[in-house]
Amino acid sequence: MNVYDFDKTIYYNDSTSDFYVFCLKRHPSVAKHFPKTMLAFIKYLLRINTKTQFKEVMYEFLHEVDIEKDLPDFWETHKQKIKPFYLAQMQQDDVIISASPEFLLEPICREVGINYLMASVVDPKTGKYTGINCHGKEKVRRFREKFGNAKIDEFYSDAYCDTPLAEAAENSFMVKGDKISPWKFR
């Protein structure tokens, strides 16, 4: 079984950022949430708030959008950002584990044929989390919760915050753009 991060790993950018910009262009009222989001980001950087708390504030922009219409339209214009290397090697038992919202990634995973998605559980109408952000050690916990001690043959990510999953895999790879190289443990 191979495990992949999503953003900047099998997708050329950050899907949440792309969706935010897409929604901002379509619904200019999204901009009214920007000052509060920036304050929450500063509090996160100063370690006053958690990443989950910051993201819940950021996702308040979802109040301004029509998720049932905007989400399919977003993926129609962004599905070409799935990287060719992934499409060429994908397998039936691949697992995508991402900090991005499950509601955001589920449609594209279904369309591409990815059967196993683990991501942050965020209410698409309120932006509130169920649980914590699927990041770092949480990815390993969630993987083990679903798959037990299943062997991870290969793991791919763009970021060292995913080292816990890289350590759990037989082989791990760092993805930067279209370049894939063996993981260098620090």
Image (spheres, grey):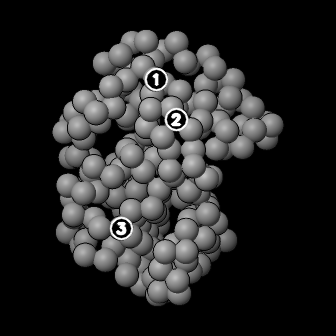
Q: Residues within 10 Å of mark 2 (few under 14, many from 20)?
A: some
Residue 9: image location, x then y, percent? 40, 58
* Mark 3, secondary structure of its residue: strand
68 vs 2, left or right, is left
Question: How many tags in the picture?
Answer: 3
Q: Are marks 1 and 2 in contact (CB under 8 Å)?
A: yes
State which quadrant residue 139 falls in.
bottom right
Cα–Cα gap, marks 1 and 3: 28 Å
Q: Identify the residue at image location x=39%, y=62%.
A: 117
Q: Nearer the viewer, residue 73 or 186?
A: 73
Ranked by sequence position, the earlier of labels 1 and 3 is: 1
Q: Identify the residue at image location x=75%, y=38%.
A: 49
Q: Is residue 127 above or below residue 89?
A: above
Instruction: In the rendered structure, find residue 84 and report the number of the disc placed on it.
Output: none
Q: Is residue 182 visible?
A: no
Residue 89: image location, x then y, percent? 24, 73
Instruction: In the rendered structure, find residue 127 and report the number of the disc placed on it.
Output: 2
Q: Residues within 10 Å of mark 3 (few under 14, many from 20)?
A: some
Q: Is residue 46 above or below residue 35?
A: below
Q: Quadrant of the N terminus?
A: bottom left
* Mark 1, secondary structure of its residue: helix
Cα–Cα gap, marks 3 and 2: 23 Å
Ranked by sequence position, the earlier of labels 3 and 2 is: 3
Inspect the image, locate mark 1, and give the three-letter code of the amino acid beneath it.
Answer: His
Residue 78: image location, x then y, percent? 25, 40
Q: Nearer the viewer, residue 143 or 22?
A: 143
Q: Quadrant of the C terminus?
A: bottom right
Residue 54: image location, x then y, percent? 65, 36
Instruction: In the rendered structure, find residue 63 and report the number of the disc placed on it.
Output: 1
Instruction: In the rendered structure, find residue 116 and report the number of the disc placed on it.
Output: 3
